[in-house]
Amino acid sequence: MLLSRSFYTRSDVTLIARELLGKYLCTSIDGLVTCGMICETEAYAGVTDRASHAFGGRRTPRTETMFREGGTAYIYLCYGIHSLFNVVTNRAEIPHAVLIRGIVPAEGTKIMLRRIGSKTLSENSGTGPGRVARLLGIHYSFSGLDLIESFGDPRHAVWIEDRGILVDPGQIQTGPRIGVGYAGEDALLPYRFVFHGKGL
DNA sequence: ATACCGATTAACT
DNA sequence: GTTAATCGGTATA
């Protein structure tokens, strides 16, 4: 079942980051469908969060996407090489977002292998935000795609499905976000969530 | 027009 | 544990 608009437009970004664990992030790029179960996320709490690109209400051509309605894809280029995928949450003008940091490959593994130029998938293949986007064929030029409206478009579609995976709160590990040392006190916030399910 | 830097990764020692 | 790769975004002038 496709996650609805109302899932994304809620106001508690850390709750949404938790609830995205166990959901399936899917893409259809040039007709090639790939999906992975989300196992790691980070919440970015908008204008009050020093780690967020939108801290202090900063609006630039890049961050403008985060000010859209929840359910929009915010994707940007990091270190000149990696596309990092986020889903925008909350209502329009409130620039909250959740970074997807890890997936377990579920569908289209053959396509994923072709994308990374490898023969087999390993434990690490879907770990790390750069690898997530690479496996799923997500490019930063897709920023602004709508995770509900794009469904069905064979060229560039990105969406998230609920496939009924139940995540016990005890299976979720919480901690500080990765790579945000520049954020001062906000670097210590427990906004990172990792799903340690069976076999993970 | 120019300078600095990053929500990372892979390949090293 | 360390480091090179790599370039668009952003601030400053």
Image: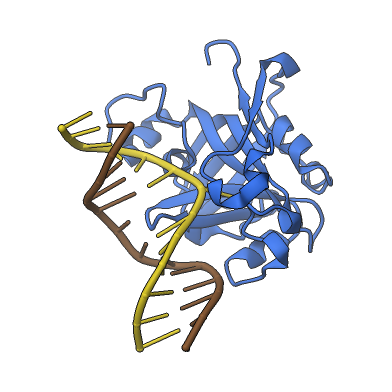
Chain colours: A blue, B yellow, C brown
Q: Is residue A107 above or below residue A169?
A: below
Dividing the picture into quadrants, the one containing residue B11 is: top left
- Residue A17 screen position, x and y as percent: 70, 37
Residue drawn at point x = 42 percent, y = 43 percent: A134
State whether residue A98 appears in this view.
no
Number of marks: 0
Q: Is residue A200 above or below residue A56?
A: above
Give the position of the N terminus of chain A as an image quadrant: top right
Front residue of A17 and C1: C1
Camera-side residue of A146 and B8: B8
Residue A42 screen position, x and y as percent: 63, 39
On screen, residue A157 above or below A173: below
The image position of residue A11, as x and y in percent, is 84, 47
* Residue farthest toward the top in the current orientation of the protein: A198
A100 and A143: which is toward the camera: A100
Residue occupying the point 74% across, 59% down: A47
x and y percentages locating residue A143 in the rendered image: 56, 59
Q: Nearer the viewer, residue A108 or A97?
A: A97
In the displayed structure, A37 sits above or below B11; it is above
Is residue A8 visible to the viewer in this orientation of the structure? yes
Q: Residue visible at 59% across and 37% down? A: A25
